[in-house]
Image (cartoon, grey):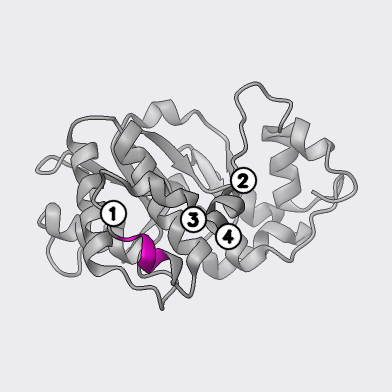
Amino acid sequence: MLELGNVAVIDAWSLLKSGGWSEWLQDSPLDQLGPALESSVFRVEHVSDAIRLLLIWKFGGTYLDLDFISIRSLDDLGNDWVGAEDRNIVSNAALNAAPAGPGHAMFENFLKEFAEKFDGAHWAVNGPYLLTNVIYKVCNLTKGTDMQEVGRMKNCGFTVHTQKFFYPISYATWRNYFSEKAWPVVNSSLGPSVHAIHFWNKLSKDEVVTVGSGQPYGRLASQYCPPVYYASVPAF
């Protein structure tokens, strides 16, 4: 990846250890949150939750977790969106907003909620649950709304894409990505709505993908990111 001209690497761990990341919080809704993030039980995860929101709020653009493979251009999706993980919740693994407008306003609401409700003791509270709660409030959704059916919300100018766009295989069946026998199931899930595929690294990080095998993750990587895949012999 480092040979690609549009890839840069930031040593986030050094930033965390030195406290240098706190400078990123200045002049933002999170400007007083540095000490709470520093003392979080899940410091790396919660700083990551904060910085992805902060960067999009400051500059606009798209955020994807590293455990994604893109199979279609995200430009087709326009701006100002998240993806539903299931009917009850959106995920913060794929995010987009323009640098100004309703998406920017939504991300400012995300950050304000983050600052007000930050919880350093629980892993997912400051990520998917936070985003879901803010979207409910800002977009005036009724209790029990199916997040898979929300789509473009004219009253707040924001979109929640269905699970198929980014999470065609749910976290409950993540092992399908690593089983050669599961290729027909995975392949059949890759309909025209799928733009990127999330591989649930929190759950799957100890799995091995052997280069040249028929494992679905490897088959998709060989097709959509071959330079990285074939440079990873013997295991991707």
Disc 1 marks which residue?
Answer: 30
Q: How far apart are the two marked residues, 4 and 3, measured between alpha carbons?
A: 28 Å
Residues in magenta?
Answer: 33-37
Of callouts 4 and 3, the N-terminal one: 3
Q: Position of residue 213 (x, y in %)?
A: 85, 50
- Determine the residue located farthest toward the bottom in the rendered image: 121
Classed neighbour count for the residue bearing mark 1: other residues with Cα under 10 Å, few (<14), some (14–19), many (≥20): many
Q: Secondary structure at mark 4?
A: loop
Circle 1: residue type: Leu
Callout 4, which amino acid? Trp
- Determine whether the residue tagged by mark 3 lies in a helix, strand or loop: loop
What separation in Å lies between label 4 and label 1 (alpha carbons)? 28 Å
Q: CA distance from mark 1 to mark 2?
A: 21 Å
Who is closer to the viewer here, 48 or 209? 48
Name the mark nearer the viewer: 2 or 3: 3
Sequence-first tag of 2 and 3: 2
> Which residue bears the numbered disc 3?
19
Within the magenta stretch, is there residue 62? no
The picture quadrant where one finds residue 143 is bottom left
Q: Label 2 vs label 4: CA separation?
A: 22 Å
